[in-house]
Image (cartoon, helix red, strand yellow):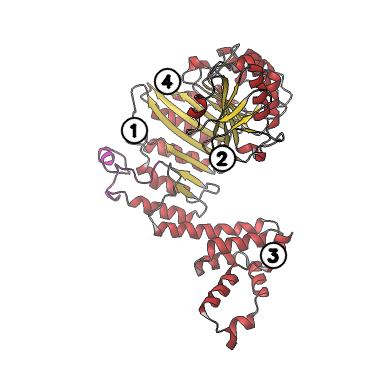
Amino acid sequence: MYKLRREPTQWNDFGWIVFQKTIAIWRDNGTLICNTNITSSLFWAFRFQERSFSFTIYDGYGDGFDFKIYGKTDAAIAETATFFLSLKHNDAKGSRLKIPIPSTDQFDFAAVFQPEQLAHVFDANPGRIYEFVEGTLSPEHSVVLATRSFPLNVKLTWLSLGDNGTAFVNALSKRDQPSFGLFSMTFCYAHLLPMSHDNIERFLNLNITFKKLDLGILYDECALLPFSIRTNALSYEFNLTLLDSSDFEDVNILTNDLDLRINLGDTYDWDEHLVSIFERIAELGHFQKLRFSVHQGFEGYYKVKDTTHIAEALIEAVIDNSDLECLDLGESYRCLDWAFQFKAMFKAMEHHPSLRKFIVDEIVPHEYCPEMEDSDSDDSTSEDSEDGSDVYDWLKQLVSKNPKIVVHDSSGTRCSNGEEIDCVYLLNRMDGYKELVKEPPSSRPLLVATALVESAAETFQNSALLLSNHADILCELLHDANLVKLFVAPEETVTPLAKSVDSKRKLRIQPLRAAKKAARK
């Protein structure tokens, strides 16, 4: 058990390594701050029978650190929680605070934690993501969420608002700041929405621009409203049972970063819905990121064997969205078999001006042939190999003709058949370094030198390709080199092997003169 010798003002005053051990910090108000990881949770549980408040802090994208604050009174626990949760985080954008709302261990967050204390926590780290889990958030707390002077990032997970969201929406409608950060509502079913039907509709019609909006399945009448909301990124799950394919013909989609999680419900002709969606996306033509996932309906998966008509609509959407940078189909494999459409899809991507990343579940599915034998698609011809190896020929042709694109599977692994396609990817990467000419003159020499040492030094071909786009930096290199010593070797250059190896090692890591100048600046 420890006591602080001075009051910290930021997380770095502790150092995260401190909380990887079993530790408790005593506060003068009679409370204890304890970390509760797997090894220490039982340790503290058997030693303290006081009421407590639990929360988790995530630093970046790791597993996070679990904490409990023990104390004899709710007021003391709330005071310590306000202090601890308000410590400045240097990288607030990579930080997330998760707070369970239900009454646990005799501490009721919604009833005890004061609105001004919650506001102080928010204001201390405006870039952090704040997630409230389960239970009910009071109207007073929801007003604090809505009235911050900065774009707050909030996730409401299986949680409801105390007055069905009336105070929250009222406060948002009067908000001085016209933008909001991330706003996410996660719930199981439409009848478990955190707000009433009327307030959901009011919320979706607010004159506010969101950084990102993440919504689950809504009521029938509101199902299309999220598409027209002003948001930089939209992630939305909707049920096709509520909609007709014709509903998408004139839907207004404002965002350019669209993530659709499509739930089939009990819709059997859902492929026509997808065609309609892709046709509308092609017509709008302003998207930069597109992600589609198809989830099972109430009766299970309805897999479409012949996906030609869906693929054709998708290809048109890709072609007509010239600014499209990322296409993600990685979570649609259970209902859609894209494998035999890759040839046409890759062909359409060969000359796309902006596409950088294409994500699929896997480049060669485990069951490659059976569905083709039952399919009437024109693509199921004898020209395609039975083991699916032809897909690598199509992939190689794609990455050879479009050096800016990389194809990944759903695990994030780059799709390849080994050295053959890996070499193409590597050459494409070298070719991509020509974009360094756009960097400021003060930093470009250092960037080129770093790329040369870390990526291109292994082969002459890679080095030549890199330096061919940076002839001026090559001139700097030759200017720095003593060509007489380099090509006219005096007798004293014959040295013992160990010294020669050290000398060569030192020579390899010496930066260019231009790089030294850039580093000094």
* Residue denoted by label 2: 288
Q: CA distance from mark 1 to mark 2?
A: 27 Å
Q: Tell me residue 74's x, y (percent).
A: 63, 17
Residue 367 part of the magenta-drawn span: yes
* Residue denoted by label 4: 241
Furthest-top residue in view?
163
Q: CA distance from mark 1 to mark 3?
A: 60 Å
Disc 3: CA contacts within 10 A as few (<14), some (14-19) or many (>=20): some
Residue visible at 70% across and 60% down in the picture: 519
Of labels 1 and 2, earlier in sequence is 2
* Residue denoted by label 1: 304
Disc 1: CA contacts within 10 A as few (<14), some (14-19) or many (>=20): some
Of labels 1 and 3, earlier in sequence is 1
Q: CA distance from mark 4 to mark 3?
A: 64 Å
Q: Amino acid at mark 3?
A: Lys
Q: CA distance from mark 2 to mark 3?
A: 38 Å
Q: Are marks 1 and 3 in contact (CB under 8 Å)?
A: no
Of labels 2 and 3, earlier in sequence is 2
Q: Is residue 280 visible?
A: no
SS for callout 1: loop
Q: Is residue 284 visible?
A: yes
Kindly indicate the quadrant of the structure image that contains residue 2: top right
Which numbered mark, 1 or 3, is in the foreground of this view?
3
Q: Amino acid at mark 2?
A: Gln
- Give the numbered dot on residue 516: 3
The boundaries of the magenta stretch are: 361-388
Which numbered mark, 4 or 3, is in the foreground of this view?
3
Return the residue nearer the eye: 463 or 103: 103
Kindly indicate the quadrant of the structure image that contains residue 373: top left
- Left or right of 385 in this view: 254: right
